[in-house]
Amino acid sequence: MMETIANMSSMSHFLLLEFSEIRELQLLHFFVFLALYLATVTGNLLIISAIVSDNHLHTPMYFFLMNLAMLDLGSISVAIPKSIVNSFFNTRLISHSGCVAQVFFLLFFVASDFALLTVMAHDRYVAICNPLRYETIMNKVACMKMVASAWISGLVYGIVHTSSTFANSFCSNVVDQFFCEIPQLLKLSCTDLYLVEVGVLVLSVSIVLGCFIFIIVTYVQIFTTVLRIPSVQGRQKAFSTCLPHLIVVSMFVFTGIFAYLRLPTNSQSDLDLAFAVIYSVVPPLMNPLIYSLRNKDIKVALWKMLNLKGSSKNPFSEFHS
């Protein structure tokens, strides 16, 4: 028995979940995910390019948006391309090192993404509720520190979770998910070490809920201020920026919590698959639409860029109010 465990813990590969065993459906999955991936990559690259090329977008808000787009590019590129390739070639294989990389980079990008969303809520609070001190509070150095903190927190988060997850010995290499997801990997554990990662997950969810509550409280204060704006157009503009943010954050939090904290089962659930797709695919896909492409300034910048009229000035040279 001990020899079997030793062999499984040193396995060279894992087998990921297939969306279907029917070849036609595998190809359908390939084309659908490929289209979603290309749309996500294109949207986020356009946002980054527009912000870099237009001096008018060199403000804290768009600086955060650019970093969000970079994180979304990273997160969508962790699991989806491998799933697309596997569907096309009708295989389930992923190497051990590839599985480790998926877990680490997905956690890194997702944690950094959520930390940045929290920072963006603070930015909107200062802009709407304390506009006279906005330039002082959200200065260049402060913005750089906030973004750096988001990236560093994601890095630490990824290292801690990945280390505690793969410290386990695995009794099987069959992962009931289309990418290497921690809850599914913990089901394969042969030892009680998985309890350490469970504890870390519970602590992490508590931190996420704390950030989520902070965002909600922040937006309650923002909405209270917005409702006092005499201009109907001004109120509509503020609400159109805030409400989509809350929707994406809420979907991100609740689907992630459901995936990571629901009671484990021995069999794969369609809900597990659905929620994994939602929290890994939908936010990176929707963020460009919600935060940027619906924004008039972004549209103008994109038009200028596509017509070769964009500015070549360094986007980090200064921030404007």
Image (cartoon, rainbow, N blue to C red):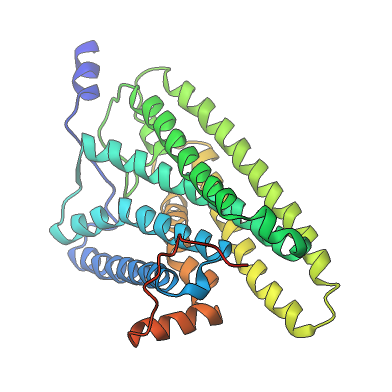
Q: From what the image shows, is residue 295 above or below residue 82? A: below
Choose top left, top right, bottom left or bottom right for residue 124.
bottom right
The residue drawn where x is 30% and y is 25% is 170
Judging depth in this view, the residue of 254 and 176 nearest the camera is 254
Judging depth in this view, the residue of 289 and 188 nearest the camera is 289
The residue drawn where x is 40% and y is 73% is 53
- Quadrant assignment for the C terminus: bottom right
Q: Position of residue 284 (x, y in %)?
A: 43, 61
Tally the numbered discs: 0
The residue drawn where x is 19% and y is 13% is 3
Q: Residue furthest left?
A: 89
Judging depth in this view, the residue of 159 and 103 nearest the camera is 159
Residue 180 appears anywhere in the view: no
Asked whether, in this view, residue 308 is left or right of residue 119, the answer is left
Q: Position of residue 104 (x, y in %)?
A: 36, 38
Q: Residue furthest top?
A: 2
Asked whether, in this view, residue 86 is left or right of residue 39, the answer is left
- Quadrant assignment for the N terminus: top left
The residue drawn where x is 36% and y is 59% is 73
Q: From what the image shows, is residue 9 above or below residue 104? A: above
Q: Position of residue 203 (x, y in %)?
A: 58, 31
Residue 168 appears anywhere in the view: yes
Asked whether, in this view, residue 262 is left or right of residue 3, the answer is right
